[in-house]
Image: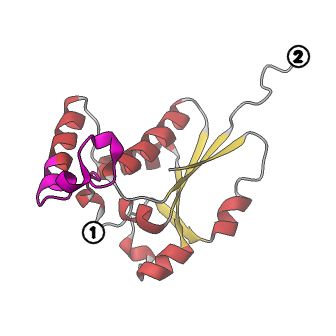
Amino acid sequence: MNEHKGAIKKMMIILSKGTLENVYAAFVLANGARMEGIEAEIFFTFFGLEAVNKKKLEHLHVATVGNPAMHLPTMLGGLPGMEALATHMMKKEMEKIDMPDIHEFLEILTASGVRMWACKLAMDMFHYTKADLYEGVENVITVGDFYKQSESEGVHMLFV
């Protein structure tokens, strides 16, 4: 009997949202994969690019409007200052458990061998250049290129 039947060998994570909670979810999943000896790649597309945009990565926010997990009425979540307050509170809780900030987490991911890619379509749409991105982003690639990198047994794709 093959003990490795169905083993996860690589996680391909697509990050399309730039909210603090989505970015951390993708980073934790990629880091967890590496800690388990599983290859990991992150494809940053649309607003997920904010997580690797040098000017924006330290300014990500928690979504308070349309986020049912916040348990806030939409009207209250949209009040001036609520998003900043929720973000501040979330960052304080993360500090208590020694969660690294976004830039430090990117350095950890890079050091652990997580491969990072930026979506060419989104880069063109937002008029970003590779110079706008965190240095650990290997390249700007198409969706097709990203799919080609997932062509092997034991690869799982996850959309965050």
- Residue 1 marker: 2
Residue visible at 47% across and 81% down in the picture? 125
In the displayed structure, does residue 72 sit left or right of residue 45? left
Which mark, residue 55?
1
Q: Quadrant of residue 97?
A: top left
| Callout count | 2
> Where in the figure is residue 66, as x and y percent of width and height?
33, 54
Hey, what amino acid is under mark 2?
Met
Residue drawn at the location 52% of the way across and 46% of the way down: 113
Q: CA distance from mark 2 to mark 1?
A: 52 Å
For the N terminus, give its image quadrant.
top right
x, y percent for residue 69: 33, 40
Q: Position of residue 147 (x, y in %)?
A: 70, 60
Neighbours of disc 1 within 10 Å: few (<14), some (14-19), many (20+) = few
* Amino acid type, residue under disc 1 in the picture: Lys
Q: Position of residue 39 (x, y in %)?
A: 61, 42
The image's colour scheme reads secondary structure
Q: Residues within 10 Å of mark 2 (few under 14, many from 20)?
A: few
CB contact under 8 Å: marks 2 and 1: no
Say what secondary structure mark 2 lies in.
Answer: loop
Magenta-drawn segment: 61-85
Q: Quadrant of residue 25?
A: top left
Task: Decide whether residue 128 is among the magenta residues.
Answer: no
Q: Residue at (16%, 38%) from the top-left corner?
A: 92
Q: Which mark is residue 147?
A: none
Kindly identify the residue that appears in the image at 42 percent across and 58 percent down: 17
Q: Earlier in the sequence, mark 2 or mark 1?
A: 2
Residue 95 versus residue 147 in the image, above or below: above
